[in-house]
Amino acid sequence: YARIFFSLTLLDSRSVQGELGWVANPTEGGWEEVRAQRVYIEIKFTLRDCNSLPGVMGTCKETFNLYYYESNNDKERYIRENQFGKIDTIAADESFTQVDIGDRIMKLNTEVRDVGALTRKGFYLAFQDVGACIALVSVRVFYKKCPLAVRNLAQFPDTITGADTSSLVEVRGSCVDNSEEKEVPKMYCGADGEWLVPIGNCLCNPGYEERNSECQACKIGYYRALASDGLCMKCPLHSYSTREGSTSCTCDKGFFRSETDPASMPCTRPPTAPLHLISNVNETSVNLEWTAPHSSGGRQDLTYNVVCKRCGPDGRRCQPCGNGVHFSPQQLSLRTNRVAITELQAHTNYTFEVWAVNGVSTQSPGPEQAVSVTVTTNQAAPSPITSIQAKDITRHTISLAWQAPERANGVILEYEVKYYEKDQNERSYRILKTAARSSDIKGLTPLTSYVFHVRARTAAGYGDFSAPFEFMTNSVPSPIIGDGANSTVLLVSVVGSVVLLLILISAFVISRRRSKYSKAKQDADEEKHLHQGVRIYVDPFTYEDPNQAVREFAKEIDASCIKIEKVIGIGEFGEVCSGRLKMPGKREICVAIKTLKAGYTDKQRRDFLSEASIMGQFDHPNIIHLEGVVTKCKPVMIITEYMENGSLDAFLRKNDGRFTVIQLVGILRGIASGMKYLSDMSYVHRDVAARNILVNSNLVCKVSDFGMSRVLEDDPEAAYTTRGGKIPIRWTAPEAIAYRKFTSASDVWSYGIVMWEVMSYGERPYWDMSNQDVIKAIDEGYRLPPPMDCPVALHQLMLDCWQRERADRPKFGQIVNMLDKLIRNPSTLKRTGGESATRGSLFEFNKCVCTGDLMAQREASATKALTGVISRSATFTRKGNWLFIKFYEFILRIPKCGTVGIDFFW
C-alpha cells in the first residue's frame, strides 16, 4: 500500500498576529486536545553565516536549542530552566550572507523533530538562542495518525500512532454495512501513519456484492445466495427477482425448484407422461417397456415409478397388489425404461401405471403424468412346495407331510412324490401320487438315506419339484419323530458347525496378528489427528477409474467459455497460458490455463488431471483456487486463478530490499496458514519451495503445484534421483531423502527453507554447492546461517524446522501462532543476528577483504552470504574458489582469491 499519513496541525505560527505575530491554529479553540503520545515540531527559520558578520567570530553561533516541558496546567506561572528537557540542537542546512541580503535572496531552512512518549495533558516548547543571528519564520506542531481506511471490506478508524518510533498499534476492524466476518479483520498502525499487515476479512451478506470497497445490494434481476459466492449473478432461466438485495430468484409460473437445487440452477417443471407403454404377459408374469416422455422438464433426475393394481372381473374395484408381487429391478425410482413383474395370480385382471417423476414432481399442484395398461394373467402351474417334514420314521417306513404351495394358481388336483436312495443319485427313482398333503412311503431299506421331492398339479399342469429333503430309515422298529431332519443331517450339522467355528477362530487369530502389525506400522508413522467436521484429503490415485476422481472434485467447463491470450511458460505436460474465463451469469475473470500437449498417453493424461483432482478438494485463501477443467475436447486444460506477480522466488529477487520485516513476516504467515490447512486435511505437499508459491496483485501468497505425486522435479541441478523418483534436495528433509519418508513434518523442514528464501530475497539455498555436498553437510549438522538483517527469532524458528528428529519440529499450527505473536510484538523482530555478539558468547563475522576481480564479481551476493552469528570453534574447508567455514551449526562461504582477511570481535 502507498505510504499515506495524516498530520493534524496543533499550532501554526504562519498567521501573523499579536505581540510576536503568532497565533494558535485553529484560532477558535486554540490547542486541540488529543491523546497523541508522540508529536512532531516543524521549524522554519533563517540563519546568517557567522563569517559574514565582522568582529563577532568569538561569540557568533550557527545553531540554537529546542526544549520542551510537560505539564498538566496550561497557565504555568513559573518554569525553571532546569525543568525543560532538551529535544535537539538545531543547525541550518543553509545560511545567508550580506550578499544574499543585497540580492534579496531568502534561504529558508526547515527542520522537523519529534518528542515522545508524552504522559501529561500538555507541554511547553522553548527555543534557546546561543548567539546565532537567527529568525524563526514559523513553528508547526503536529502528530501523525493512520487515516480511516477500508481493507477487505473491514473499516479501520482513524488511529493515532504509538509512542515509540517502531511501535505498532493493533486495530480491529469492523465489517462494512451489509457484511459479516469470515476471519477477524485486523491491521497494524505503524509509527509513520501507514497501515500494515492486513489480516482477516469480511464477506458481503447474501444479496449483496462487493463494489468499491462496499457491499451493495444486487440489482433487480440478480441475486447472491451465499456469502462465499462471488459477485451477484443474473437470475437463472425461468426465474426472476423483483427487489434489490435478493438471495434467490422466484420461479416463473409453472416452474419449480426442489429443496436440493442450488440457487444457480434454472427452474424446472415436472416431466410429461412416458410414451408407448407395451406389455408382454407370460402366464403369471408381465414385462413392461416404454419410451422416455416427450419432455423431462429440463432436469437430469428423471425416474419412473410403477404402480400395480389388482382389479375385479369387470376391470373395476381395483386395489393395490400388496407385497406379494415382485418387481425387477425395482418398483420405484427406476432409471431404466423396462421392468419385469412376477409372482402374480393366474386368471386375474391387473392394471399397471408407469409414472414419470423428477425432483419437482411433488411441488407441482397439477396431477403427475402417467401412462397405464390393463392385462389378464394366463392359467399357470402351481409354485414349488417349500417344506417337507418327516412325521415318523421306522426301519421300512417314512411318513411325510407338506404345506400347500404358496401360489396354487388354481385347484390342486394331486401331489406327486419322487424319492430315491441317496447313493443312486436319481439314477433309479420311484413316483407316488396322492390327493392329500401327506403320504406314507413304505418298503424302504433300514439304515438307508433317501431323498424326497414333491410337486403339485392343477389343470394347467405340474409345478416344479421342491428342493431335495433327505431322511434316513431307522434300525429299530420304534419310530423317530423329526422335523425334516434325521441323524445324518444332525451329524453333518454338528460337524459343519465345528469346522466353521475352527475357521472363524483361525481367521480371528490371523486378523489380530495383522492388526498388531498394522498398528505397529501406524505408530511408526506420523500421528494423524482426524477432527470432527474437518475434510480429509482423498488420493485420486486410489480410484479405479481416474476420471471418476476428476468428475467428483473438479468442475467441467465448456471450452467456449475460455479465451487463451498468450503463453507465459512451459510445463511438464504442455504450455501454461494466461487467458480469460467467462461463465454464464458471471463476470469475466483472468485465469491461468495449463494445457496437455498433443500425442499424450493415457498415463500422461491421468497424471495431468490428477493435479486438478487434488486442487479441487482445497478451499483456502492461501491455496491456489481451481476454477475447473476441460476434458471433453482437445486440448485438455486445467483452469486456475491467475496470480499476477508469478512465483515468490522471482518476485522477491525483483523487489530485493523493498519490504519491511513485518511485511516479510506477513508473507510467511500466509504460506504457513495454507500449509496448516493442507496438514489438517492430511495432505503432504512434498515440494514446498518459494518457486511453488504464487503471489497475486494484493501480495497474497498461495501454495501451488500439487503434482509432486507423479514427478518431483525435472531440473537435474535441483533434484537428486533415487529409485523412487526425483527429490528437490535443497528443500527436502533428511528422512525424505534417505528413506522417501514424506510427512507433514518433512513439509515443515521445507517450509524452513522457504523462510530462508523469503528473508534472503530469493537467494538460492546452499548457493552453488552440489547436491551431494548439501546432503553431506546436512548429515554432519550444518545449517544455513541467518540472512542479512534477519531477526534472531525468525532464524531460531528456521532452526526449529530443521531439527533432525521430525518429532521435534513444530507443527504448522504452532508456526502460525508464533508468527502471529511476532506480528503483534514487532519489538521482538528488532534484534538481528549481529547484536548477539555483544553478549560475549558468540563471534560475529564482520568483513571480508579480498583482492582480484573475483571479489568484485561476487560482492553483491557475498554481502548477504557472509553475514551471520558464529561460535568460537571453526572448521575451514577449501573447495574450488570458495572457502567454507563451519561455526557452531551454520555454514558461511567466503570467496577464495589472493588473500582473505576476516575480522572478528567480541
Image: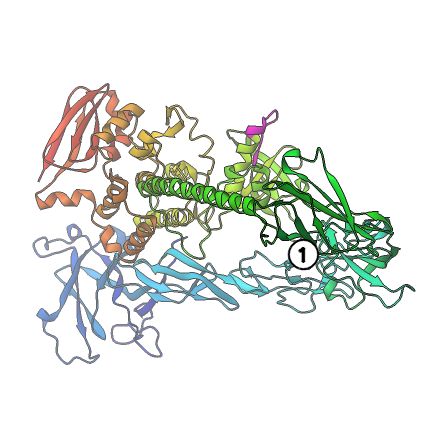
Is 110 displayed left or right of 428 in the figure? left
**Looking at the image, residue 219 lies above or below residue 440:** below
Q: Position of residue 840 (x, y in %)?
A: 8, 43
Q: Nearer the viewer, residue 681 or 92?
A: 681
Q: Position of residue 434 (x, y in %)?
A: 78, 51
Check disc 1: other Cα within 10 Å, few if <14, some if 14-19, many if 20+: some
**Looking at the image, residue 445 lies above or below residue 28:** above
- Residue 303 visible to an observer of this rendering: no
- Residue underneath mark 1: 265
Residue range (magenta): 594-604
Q: Is residue 76 magenta?
A: no
Q: Amino acid at mark 1?
A: Met
Q: Nearer the viewer, residue 741 or 813?
A: 741
Q: Residue furthest front?
A: 477
Q: Nearer the viewer, residue 193 or 394?
A: 394
- Residue 207 visible to an observer of this rendering: yes
Report which quarter residue 108 is drawn in.
bottom left
Q: Position of residue 702 (x, y in %)?
A: 44, 45
Is 782 displayed left or right of 463 in the figure? left
Which element type, helix, strand or loop, lies under badge 1?
A: loop
Q: Position of residue 159 (x, y in %)?
A: 35, 66
Report which quarter residue 372 is drawn in.
bottom right
